Image (spheres, rainbow, N blue to C red):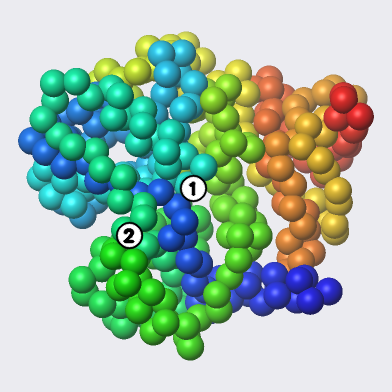
Amino acid sequence: MVATEKLIEDLKAAREAAALYDASHWGQFLAVGPDAAGFLHRMLSNEVQKLAIGEGRYQGLLDRKGLTLSLFYLKRLGEQEFLGVTPPQLAEKTISFLSKMKFIEKLTITDVSKDRGLLFLIGPQAPALKASVPGSLLVWEEDTFGIPWITLSGPKAEIDTAATSLAPKTVRIGDEALQLLHMAAGFPEYGTDLTEASILLETAIPPAHQRSKGCYPGQEVIERISTYGKGRAPRRLVHFTIPGEKELPKGTILTLKDGAAAGKVTSAFFDPLENVTRVMASLEAKYLDPFSADVGQCQFLPPASS
């Protein structure tokens, strides 16, 4: 009961006031040098070279089959300097892969995860609190999650100071609340909803690729799907809600009202503030339209291994 009450408090703060999440365990790296923009542009699925200083975008790091090795945020700090922010489970993998692919290019890729801290300031009151953030920190806003979402990055000591300063005006939220906020926006959890077996186009959020940017690993596959499949991958991640609290283990089979097995649940968590179970599921493309029409009549079968 105590845990549920805390989760309700966290979600209410994020949706109605201001919440603070300490993401300092996430990964951060710097790519610096005269070839940084060109190298990253060739390696990643979204625009890099045309990013203005201060601008950032989500990026896919793909293999030659278009499968998603990593999904992370890249921000341009200067003409020759970029900051990458990855979920904790992708930090080492992303940094290591990019470093291995660098040959004669003039740039350094440095893991600064231990030196830098990271905060997410979330909620309708978050923009007004930016004024109290020290000017030495990197601060940027995103529109990915459907609610005001501000990221603060900088030296750990300065991030700790900022967190202390913001504490009286915010509610410190935990991992479960962050996960539910991500799910509400249809944002995939890498390793759970989106994996190395997933094509980047299986998720529509965030828009992490750009067709006009030129070649990158996996681009041929993405372009083939975009052209001949009209952007529709064989499978697509969808988010939906079910009234009340339901236990839906990963792999639960989702069936339509006619009994057709349309896909599988990738994750499901109860949102006590809304009194719904939020579900992320991977659906076969041919069932997307019937699912959209009949979402309230879907049935669930235990995973095949049960």
Query: Which residue bears the numbered disc 1?
Result: 88
Residue 52 shows in this picture = no
Amino acid type indicated by mark 2 = Arg
Q: Residue at x 58, y 70 (%)?
A: 173
Labels 1 and 2: the sequence-earlier one: 1
Residue closer to the observer: 306 or 160? 160
Q: Is residue 140 placed above or below 260 in the rendered structure? A: below
User: Within the image, what quadrant is residue 139 found in?
Assistant: bottom left
Q: Secondary structure at mark 1?
A: helix
Q: Residue at x 71, y 42 (%)?
A: 267
Query: Which residue bears the numbered disc 2?
Result: 116
Residue closer to the observer: 64 or 141? 64
Would residue 5 appear left or right of 174 to someone viewing this image?
A: right
**Residue 213 percent coordinates (x, y):** 25, 26
Q: Is residue 141 placed above or below 66 in the rendered structure? A: below
Would residue 28 appear left or right of 226 to someone viewing this image?
A: left
Tag 1 near tag 2, CB within 8 Å: no
Q: Secondary structure at mark 2?
A: strand
